[in-house]
């Protein structure tokens, strides 16, 4: 996808000539995992539009770094600092093996905004999406106990980034470590390991090098408190998994086909 087409998808309604102007000044940047696009405390130099990969926004607290949000392809970051001119409040760190993003110089962007009300409105909508990604952290932390917070996190990641399969499972192509999950739900790494070990034994989720597979989305919804059904007991979870596997085996089910969102 070309730069103008990507901008048109992200900045809906902006005049073609303005999109072309922005495309001409865009600079493509590549970052390896754990590299920073920008750091907290730095003055904002650019707005970033993610083309490929995953970026985490990290805030430094007295207790250590905390992941505040995850953003992926076609999402942009840095709006508030660009508009206010204040230093960046968080680090933007590559969370996937490789991140490719377009950087739009702040001065060029402000000049274009001065000539296009549509661009100003589109950037406000993009800023709102970035803010919603940050507010998801509040939803996760307010979900209750650690198990409910983890289930809420997985469901939200699945809603934004997941692929649904014909057999009812979903895959989240985000290879987060147990430590990163712990930061996202504000608990210890050991607690996350215990919960995931139990969920994997019960057949709710599986971990792969590409991310997470959700076998029982409805059960996770019940644990998160977003389903009308109560969370199933552990034994019932295993029985349901065994029944599903037996049914798949009887049908001679092959590999599931992804239904892209």
Image: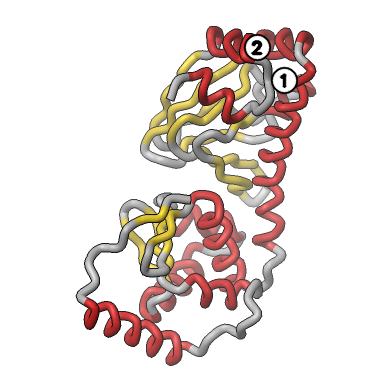
Secondary element at tag 1? helix
x then y, percent, for residue 86: 76, 23
Name which quarter of the figure residue 145 lies in.
Answer: bottom right
Q: Residue 208, labelled with which disc? A: none
Residue 65 appears in the figure: no
Taking depth in this image into account, of 247 and 123 the one nearest to the observer is 247
Taking depth in this image into account, of 194 and 217 the one nearest to the observer is 217
On the rendered structure, is 41 left or right of 199? Answer: right
Residue 152 appears in the figure: yes
- In which quadrant is the N terminus drawn? top left
Secondary element at tag 2? helix
Return the residue at label 2.
Answer: 18
On the rendered structure, is 103 left or right of 107? Answer: left
Return the residue at label 1.
Answer: 119
Say which residue appears at 45% left-offset and 20% top-offset: 2
Say which residue appears at 72% left-offset and 20% top-offset: 119
Taking depth in this image into account, of 7 and 111 the one nearest to the observer is 7
Say which residue appears at 57% left-offset and 10% top-offset: 20
């Amino acid at each position: 996808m070309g730069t103008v087409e990507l901008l048109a998808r992200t900045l809906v309604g902006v005049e073609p000539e303005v999109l072309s102007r922005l495309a001409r000044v865009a600079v493509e940047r590549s970052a390896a995992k754990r590299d920073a696009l920008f750091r907290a405390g730095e003055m904002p130099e650019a707005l970033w539009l993610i083309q490929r990969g995953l970026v985490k926004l990290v805030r430094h607290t007295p207790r250590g770094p905390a992941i505040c949000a995850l953003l992926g392809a076609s999402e942009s970051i840095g709006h508030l600092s660009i508009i206010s001119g204040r230093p960046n409040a968080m680090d933007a760190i590559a969370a996937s093996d490789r991140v490719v993003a377009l950087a739009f110089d702040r001065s060029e962007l402000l000049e274009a905004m001065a000539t296009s009300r549509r661009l100003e409105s589109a950037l406000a909508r993009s800023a709102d999406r970035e803010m919603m990604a940050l507010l998801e952290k509040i939803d996760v932390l307010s979900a209750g106990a650690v198990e409910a917070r983890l289930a809420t996190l997985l469901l939200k990641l699945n809603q934004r980034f997941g692929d649904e399969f014909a057999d009812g499972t979903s895959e989240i192509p985000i290879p987060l470590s147990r430590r990163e999950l712990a930061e996202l739900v504000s608990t210890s790494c050991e607690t996350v390991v215990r919960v995931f070990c139990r969920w994997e034994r019960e057949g709710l989720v599986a971990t792969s090098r590409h991310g997470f597979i959700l076998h029982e989305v409805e059960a996770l919804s019940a644990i998160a408190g977003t389903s009308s059904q109560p969370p199933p007991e552990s034994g019932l979870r295993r029985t349901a998994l065994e029944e599903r596997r037996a049914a798949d085996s009887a049908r001679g089910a092959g590999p599931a086909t992804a239904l892209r969102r």
